[in-house]
Image: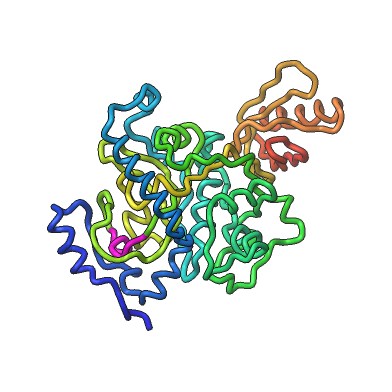
Amino acid sequence: MAGKDRVDVGAVQRALETQNHPWEAAENHLTRLSGDDRARRLGVPLPDEEHLALLEQRAVQLRARLLEPPSVAAAALPAAFDLRNIGGQNYVSGIRDQGNCGSCVAFGSVAVLEGTARYTRGLPTLDSDFSEAHLFYGWGSTVGVNCNTGWMPLPALTFATNDGICFESEWAYTAGNTNGGSAPANWQQHRAKATGTVDVTNKVEDIKAHLTSVGPVTGCFVVYTDFFSYKSGVYQQTSGKVEGGHCVAIVGYDDAQQAWIIKNSWGTGWGMGGYGLIRYGQCYIDTWSNIAVTGVNVRTWTSAKKVIGGYSTGHDRNGWVYVQDNGWLHVGGTTGTAHVAMFADLLTAKEKGAYVNAYSDDGTIKTVYAY
């Protein structure tokens, strides 16, 4: 029953007071849930005793490294970085809510794909709303994954690399897939596919470097009861028992606060509008499962957009156009003549200020309508 075993936020606040208020706790929709329902908002299987001992060893070593002077590589990185504010531009997709299902890995992994697709292209407005449902209920179910089992980021992002996922518009997420969704027969014509995965677990400098150059990274960590009541500040475990494992997307960091910036999947009513700060080395956030992707290829129509620029080196079939909100796209064509004709149509549309709708297959325009 909702409310049974609810989080005693007052007790959390008193515990924080004894530690000089390192962060702020408050009531929210999660603290009012029963213990069972709170556990369903997680979704990373807790490690066994041997793995837990390894994680603890890593965490101790990490905390020791953080006290040492930074290396040359670390010193070259910016002291703070936030994918939500790069020159005033936000490359992070919106906050979602996984609901009553242990599907956090799908949300953390898809946030990595969406943020990488936008940031590597320099396009904060790129349509990159990919389907968590396809990743979790589609591919995950083929290896026994469901709302009760949870998952891990590496196998999830491996599916995204080997097979790809459709867009949210084709398979919308509901907790437990209650809408009965499935991938349409032609989903591969409108899909995202990672170019590869990279494991930066237990490598703080590598996590930061990947964030600044490519995009978000997953972070798995142990959730204690007090984390559900997090409102603001830099989280560090203060009170409560182990509730389970959880996955989020790390979207930035702040050395002055010694903290990672995380994007959670518990809706905007948790934390700072769905985001939070977790101190380096806390709860294995940076020593457990930090997985990212090297890039994201996308098959999609641009929708009605304008051609902003054109480029050619003079080499055979090497024409490029910059399409509004989609960036530089290579002009295709099965023959040299077809390539030249398509390139000419696109440049004519540019000169006239006309709209085009181009089908881009992993960055190459295959079909275009100009009007």
| Magenta-span inclusion, residue 239 | no
Towards the viewer: 289 or 91: 289
Q: Is residue 350 visible?
A: yes
- Residue drawn at x 35%, y 62% as measured from the top left: 269
Q: Quadrant of residue 67?
A: top left
Point out the stretch of residues depicted in magenta: 223-230
- Residue drawn at x 65%, y 54% as measured from the top left: 166
User: Of all residues shown, which one is farthest toward the top?
Assistant: 314
- Residue drawn at x 80%, y 20% as measured from the top left: 316
The colour style of the image is: rainbow
Towards the viewer: 351 or 158: 158
Figure check: 227 above or below 192: below
User: Of all residues shown, which one is farthest toward the front?
Assistant: 50
User: Of all residues shown, which one is farthest toward the bottom?
Assistant: 1
Position of residue 164 in the picture relative to residue 284 (left or right): right
**Residue 308: % across, % down:** 61, 30
Towards the viewer: 163 or 83: 163
> Which quarter of the image is occupied by the N terminus?
bottom left
**Residue 119: % across, % down:** 51, 37
- Residue drawn at x 15%, y 64% as measured from the top left: 14
> Which quarter of the image is occupied by the C terminus?
top right
Position of residue 368 in the picture relative to residue 66 (left or right): right
Towards the viewer: 282 or 369: 282
Mostly what secondary structure, the magenta segment?
Answer: helix
**Residue 179: % across, % down:** 60, 72
Position of residue 182 in the picture relative to residue 198 (left or right): right
Q: How many marks?
A: 0
Figure check: 293 above or below 97: above
Figure check: 291 above or below 317: below
**Residue 174: % across, % down:** 55, 68
Q: Is residue 303 visible?
A: no
